[in-house]
Amino acid sequence: MHTTADIDKIIILDFGSQYTQLIAKKIRSIGVCAHIYPFYVDLETINKYNPKGIVLSGGPASVYDEDSYLLSPFLLELKIPILAICYGMQLIVNYLGGEITLADKKEFGSTKLSVLNSSPLLEGLNINEFNVWMSHSDHVTKLSDDFIIIASTGNCPYAMVENKSRNIFGLQFHPEVEHSEHGITILYNFVTNICKCSKSWSFENIIDNTIVELKDKIGSEKVILALSGGVDSSVAAMLLNKTIGKQLTCIFIDNGLLRLKEAENVKKAFEHFDLNIIYLDRSELFLDALKGIFDPEEKRKVIGHTFIEVFTQEAKKLSEVHWLAQGTIYSDIIESGKGSHAKTIKSHHNVGGLPKDIDFKIIEPLSDLFKNEVREIGLKLGLPNSMLYRHPFPGPGLGIRVLGEVRQEYCDIVRQADNIFTQELINHGLYYDLNQAFVVFIPEKSVGVIGDNRRFNWIVSLRAVKTNDFMTASWAGLPYDFLNRVSTRIINEVPQISRVLYDISNKPPATIEWE
Ligand code: XMP
């Protein structure tokens, strides 16, 4: 049995491109292990990682910027193949004596690429022209003698270049982006034919390797994990359960701010797997702590602190626990700017600020995996689709979906409305087209009429968004008759609600949550 340390790997050096994670995901989808490191990574780290190929990502800089991201010359001494994309290509061509011209305008979008010479990057592609995705300002205007042109576009004579003696390939376009036709073939040819990587990044191997690594680390020691029922903590729990069985204790805390029947559903999802789970209902404690608090950030803090208090008390009751497991995933680590194997505590896991007298070592079984990989592994380990593909739910839960002061009554109302909205989205086949959808409670009353009676009751708003990265989001154009059905059901079935709104704000400037 081998571990990740023994398998063939590609290193991706990040020069700040918005697509860097996509490069890693695409290479992994081919079946080859790939990790991202910052562009300034040192030689020792690279040697330890032992890659069979290097990819230089693109980036927003210009080689002429005073503080431009530089190429570490030792990369060229490693004698392993390099695929340099966009800014990465400009850097390497410039370093080896070519010329880069500053552009006054950006070339962005799909462009026809004409193939002029054969290249191992194009193996299996018997075509002379295809469309590729450009997103650059500067471009190469002269190559040093040891480079040849493979392909050009109308605006960009050196769109694809090769340096045979050094085994360096340069692409001005982005093969990792869906809009680049045959981009995946180019990446495939680079990692399998040129770098000669074997395809060992399969979900079965990932599970086996992770189990070997976890066993080695944990031995016979005990581990605790805060199980929220979300994708990451659930898959982490399943992996650890498979590895160390009853050495793992999961703690599920009902903070009174969860979705309808959440605790029940989590119990149901895990009941076949014989996990050690302690279920705690601490709703009253959380709701008491939130009394009189209106400010969203203050509410987040109170919920976080109360969580830590409850979790710590429970952990202290268990004997001899050495490890705290967290569901941190690879994107969290990359986005924290700490590079590939740095360990960070995910702040919104709410266990970041554990008191000093609880001295756990941290274990993160998913820290090498992207979200799509975590989901696939969850499926392989037997978790249901409905759990793995659910919309994200924020740590503070309904605490930030009940505007202003959080009260039990408000939570109960919004829980019911939210459940109706979600059910209807699922029934109409709309749920999985959205990235997040929920109901917000507005603590204001509005007049309504039911039969001959006036009623003066609460207002809720539906929120449904589409987004790729949750940094920007668009409100979803749900069909009017669907919205009509949801609002009718909510007003009929939740008598405390007299009015339903639909939020049509994009992010930015609005945020996805209302608080
Ligand atoms: P915003 O509202 O900032 O939300 O546009 C972006 C994403 O982050 C989630 N979110 C949170 N998640 N703790 C969390 O665990 C929080 O305090 C928090 N605030 C926002 C939100 O649900 C959305 O997916």
Image (cartoon, helix red, strand yellow):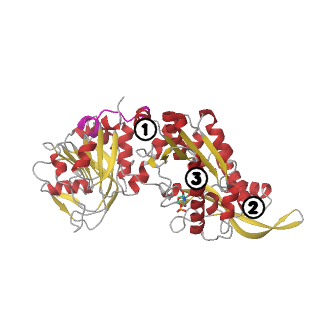
Q: Does residue 360 appear anywhere in the picture?
A: yes
Counting labels gives 3
Q: Quadrant of ligand 1?
A: bottom right
> Which label's residue is closer to the chain start, 3 or 2?
3
The percent position of residue 26, horizontal first and vertical second, equals 37, 43
The percent position of residue 200, horizontal first and vertical second, equals 35, 33
Q: Does residue 180 appear anywhere in the picture?
A: no
Amino acid at circle 1: Leu
Q: Of discs 1 and 2, which sits in the foreground? A: 1
Quadrant of the rendered image containing residue 142:
bottom left
Name the secondary structure under disc 3: helix
**Which residue position holds label 1?**
214
User: Residue 200: within the magenta?
Assistant: yes
- Ligand 1 within 8 Å of the CB at mark 1: no
Q: Of discs 3 and 2, which sits in the foreground? A: 3
Is the residue marked by circle 1 packed among few (<14), some (14-19), or many (20+) residues within 10 Å?
Answer: some
Amino acid at circle 2: Glu
Quarter of the image where the C terminus is located: bottom right
Q: Of discs 3 and 1, which sits in the foreground? A: 3
Numbered range of the magenta stretch: 190-204
Quarter of the image where the N terminus is located: top left
**Which residue position holds label 3?**
311
Nearest the eye: 279 or 80:
279
> Which label's residue is closer to the chain start, 1 or 2?
1
**Which residue position holds label 2?**
409
Is the residue marked by circle 3 packed among few (<14), some (14-19), or many (20+) residues within 10 Å?
Answer: many
Q: CA distance from mark 3 to mark 2?
A: 26 Å
Nearest the eye: 42 or 506:
42
Name the secondary structure under disc 2: helix
